[in-house]
Image (cartoon, rainbow, N blue to C red):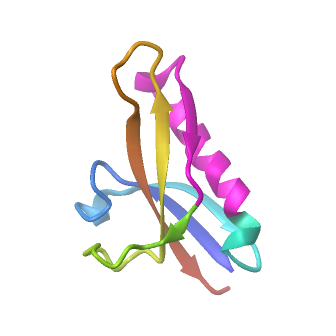
Amino acid sequence: MKYILYRSFGSIDKDVRKHELVAVEYGKDIYEVTDALIKAAADDLAGMPEYENCETAAFAPEPVKEFRRVRKYQYEMTGIVYPKYAEKNVLIEYGIVEESE
């Protein structure tokens, strides 16, 4: 299976055509590529100039929630930025497309 990771610019439900490609991973299922997707999302955030010198991480992928309007993605995940001096963390939504090869 092929898993394509996209970063959204705000809500995962909005401006789907403007989402930015972040990574492509291959594995037999989502569980086999979970660690690689988490690392790709965290590295993507760490490479953004506005989050320079911040710690980054990401939650594991999960199936897209039913309340979502977007139908492009089969999975979603959240990237996290931990600014050194801020009242709260920054959360960035990612979508994942699952394709068979």
Identify the residue shown where x is 27% and y is 75%: 67
The image quadrant of residue 28 is bottom right
Rendered position, 53 above or below 27: above
Q: Where is residue 73 shown, x and y percent of the image?
A: 43, 74
- Circle count: 0
Of 1 and 17, nearer the camera is 1
Drawn side of residue 50 relative to residue 39, left or right? left
Q: Where is residue 62 shown, x and y percent of the image?
A: 53, 68
Drawn side of residue 40 relative to residue 81, left or right? right
The image quadrant of residue 17 is bottom left
Rendered position, 26 above or below 49: below
Q: Where is residue 32 shown, x and y percent of the image?
A: 76, 69
Drawn side of residue 40 relative to residue 36, left or right? left
Drawn side of residue 68 relative to residue 62, left or right? left
Instruction: Quadrant for the C terminus, please.
Output: bottom right
Identify the residue shown where x is 27% and y is 55%: 11
The region drawn magenta spans 34-60
Residue furthest toward the bottom?
Answer: 100
Is 67 included in the stretch rendered in magenta? no
Residue furthest toward the top?
Answer: 85
Residue furthest toward the front?
Answer: 87
Q: Where is residue 100 shown, x and y percent of the image?
A: 64, 87
Identify the residue shown where x is 56% and y is 52%: 59
Of 19 and 53, nearer the camera is 53
Identify the residue shown where x is 47% and y is 77%: 74
Instruction: Quadrant for the N terminus, please.
Output: bottom right
Rendered position, 29 above or below 89: below
